[in-house]
Image (cartoon, coloured by chain):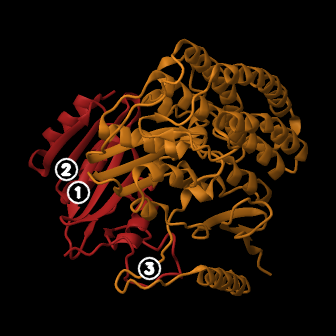
Chain colours: A orange, B red
């Protein structure tokens, strides 16, 4: 009897919060190869952006990712402001960085929780998500939304952070800091977490360079790249902070980088709040009349790594082409390196270690035939296609691998 | 460690007439248009000698043909170098970079799928995102120009 198995994870699986299909080709307990199938989340955002005005694109790109929803508007604003060659006010810079760093804190807490869940360590999951709540409440207070904050626009931000809000943010941050201490201690000193994550899913420095991986995935393997430092934008050149790195490249190192980064984020926000107090209230915007012709490349360091937006403007009020590269697009490809040779039970945490975001990775859907202009896919078609795909997978699974 | 000027001078010295235009957008952003035949050598120089990281490539269909901007980042000086090529309208093809680094593997598949650009010597030019759901030989990002 053969001991070769194909284990599918997904496309709809309780382990994953988003639809995706991983095929693990195993011999006994060991993963020998991995294939990744995508296409379940396409929404056509790059194409849609061409039919929206620059102001509308902010709301569109904010919906690329539900977790790091401000990183895409951040990169888009940087790209468009580069085309216009404009400098925003210092107050707007501080507010942008505060939103960006609050998002990093809540996203890293979310990851720590999910990583605990994948390990079967649900106490970590419950605690991390509980401590994340006050950060989301802060977002609601500042922006009116717990997620998809609609804060950014070309030339500045939409809402100010006034004095009473600054005091509230400081109060919550003090609490978050205490809870982060607690959580970091619990995770870093726990022998079970050590046993499950150390030496698991290792990515070497060479792998990172080969795959072009970014963010905590790269920094955990000793590649100290961080757009906030390398190509500073918003308020990052105005505050003091350091890039956190580790060298082991395993899952534990990735957790370590994320946990320690939260302290840096708290420090950045505190410095930005100090800066805000010195700036004149209400000075959050400059007027931008036209977007000239040109090409703009905007980058922002999202919680998962560098978000890259390239905007081609033809001088009209919509982008002629808008290319988006989310960090998961390059990080997910590293699974080929991190999972092969692992046991099945370690493969799941290796997959989770890069904090993959599938919604970010996929942005295309096709709605019209370019030759006839006929609509070829509607909601029912998409459901039919989805059901067909499931049937195909089920059929394939009956075949011997 | 090479800085921005050294990288740009190196491009001019090594590839001379194959570099057709260099446009400075600002101190950290340059668009360098090259002859498509030089893409492999230029990328090799940037990746191996200059220590650049391949970020992604953006393709677009314009009246000039199919254009690809290969975005390279030199992280220690915050430089984004856009290597720009223009491919023929009728049979767009260019050498694949995926045998040099894996970072370009998916995006070349995606550009092949959306624009119909052929990447020569690509290790696995299968569809990336619309497998089984989209007709062969129909490329959704192509435009029609009158």
Q: Determine whether A148 is above or below A46 in the image.
A: above
What residue sits 67% from the left and 40% below the top? A144
Q: Secondary structure at mark 1?
A: strand
Label 2 sits on residue: B33
> Residue B25, percent across and down?
25, 38
Furthest residue in direction top, as rendered: A278
Label 3 sits on residue: A368
Q: Secondary structure at mark 2?
A: strand
Front-most of residues A155 and A178: A155
Crowding at dot 2, Cα within 10 Å, few <14 / some 14-19 / many 20+, comes out as some
Crowding at dot 3, Cα within 10 Å, few <14 / some 14-19 / many 20+, comes out as some
Q: Chain of mark 1?
A: B
Is residue A20 visible in the rendered image? The answer is yes
Label 1 sits on residue: B85
A357 lies left or right of A397? left
Count all numbered tags in the image, as a single digit.
3
Furthest residue in direction left, as rendered: B17
Report if the CB atoms under discs 2 and 1 are less than 8 Å apart.
yes
Instruction: Check the picture and name the quadrant holding the C terminus of chain A.
Output: bottom right
Whole-number angstrom distance, CA of label 3 to CA of label 1 = 29 Å
> Residue A243, percent across and down?
56, 26
Among numbered discs 2 and 1, the one appearing first in the sequence? 2
> Residue A360, percent across and down?
57, 55
A376 lies left or right of B21? right
Mark nearest the camera among 3 and 1 is 3
């Amino acid at each position: 009897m053969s001991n070769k198995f194909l284990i599918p994870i997904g496309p709809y699986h309780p382990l994953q919060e988003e639809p995706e299909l991983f095929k693990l080709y195993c011999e006994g307990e060991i993963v020998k190869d991995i294939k990744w199938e995508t296409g379940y989340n396409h929404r056509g955002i790059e194409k849609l952006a061409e039919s929206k005005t620059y102001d509308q694109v902010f709301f569109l790109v904010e919906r690329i990712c539900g977790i790091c929803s401000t990183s895409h508007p951040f990169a888009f604003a940087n790209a468009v402001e580069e085309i216009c060659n404009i400098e925003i006010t210092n107050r707007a810079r501080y507010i942008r960085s505060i939103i960006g760093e609050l998002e990093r804190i809540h996203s890293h807490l979310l990851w720590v929780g999910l990583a605990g869940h994948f390990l079967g360590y649900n106490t970590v999951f419950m605690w991390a998500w509980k401590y994340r709540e006050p950060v989301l409440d802060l977002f609601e207070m500042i922006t009116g939304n717990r997620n998809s904050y609609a804060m950014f626009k070309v030339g500045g931000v939409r809402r100010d952070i006034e004095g009473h809000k600054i005091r509230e943010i400081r109060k919550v941050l003090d609490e978050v800091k205490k809870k982060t201490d607690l959580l970091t201690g619990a995770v870093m000193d726990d022998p079970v977490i050590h046993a499950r994550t150390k030496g698991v899913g290792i990515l070497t420095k060479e792998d990172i360079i080969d795959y072009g991986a970014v963010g905590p995935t790269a920094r955990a393997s000793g590649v100290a790249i961080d757009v906030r430092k390398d190509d500073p934008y918003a308020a990052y050149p105005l505050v003091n902070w350091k890039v956190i790195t580790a060298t082991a490249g395993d899952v534990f190192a990735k957790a370590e980088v994320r946990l320690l980064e939260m302290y840096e984020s708290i420090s950045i926000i505190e410095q930005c709040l100090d800066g805000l107090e010195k700036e004149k209230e209400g000075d959050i915007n400059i007027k931008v009349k036209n977007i000239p012709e040109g090409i703009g490349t905007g980058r922002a360091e999202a919680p998962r790594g560098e978000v890259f937006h390239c905007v081609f403007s033809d001088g009209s009020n919509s982008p002629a082409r808008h290319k988006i590269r989310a960090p998961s697009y390059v990080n997910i490809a590293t699974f080929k390196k991190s999972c092969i040779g692992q046991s099945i039970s370690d493969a799941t945490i290796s997959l989770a270690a890069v904090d993959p975001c599938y919604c970010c990775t996929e942005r295309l859907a096709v709605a019209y035939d370019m030759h006839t202009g006929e609509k070829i896919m509607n909601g029912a078609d998409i459901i039919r296609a989805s059901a067909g795909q499931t049937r195909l997978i089920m059929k394939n699974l009956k075949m011997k691998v | 460690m090479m800085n921005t000027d050294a990288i740009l001078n190196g491009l001019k010295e090594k590839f001379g007439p194959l570099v057709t235009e260099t446009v400075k957008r600002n101190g950290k952003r340059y668009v360098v248009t090259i002859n498509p035949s030089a893409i492999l050598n230029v990328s090799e120089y940037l990746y191996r000698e200059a220590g650049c990281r391949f970020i992604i490539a953006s393709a677009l269909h314009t009246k000039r043909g199919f254009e690809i901007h290969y975005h390279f980042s030199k992280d220690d000086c915050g430089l984004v170098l856009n290597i720009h090529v223009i491919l023929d309208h009728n049979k767009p093809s260019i050498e694949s970079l995926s045998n040099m680094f894996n970072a370009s593997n998916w995006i070349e598949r995606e550009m092949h799928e959306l624009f119909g650009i052929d990447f020569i010597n690509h290790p696995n030019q299968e569809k990336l995102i619309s497998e089984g759901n989209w007709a062969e030989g129909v490329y959704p990002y192509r435009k029609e120009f009158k």
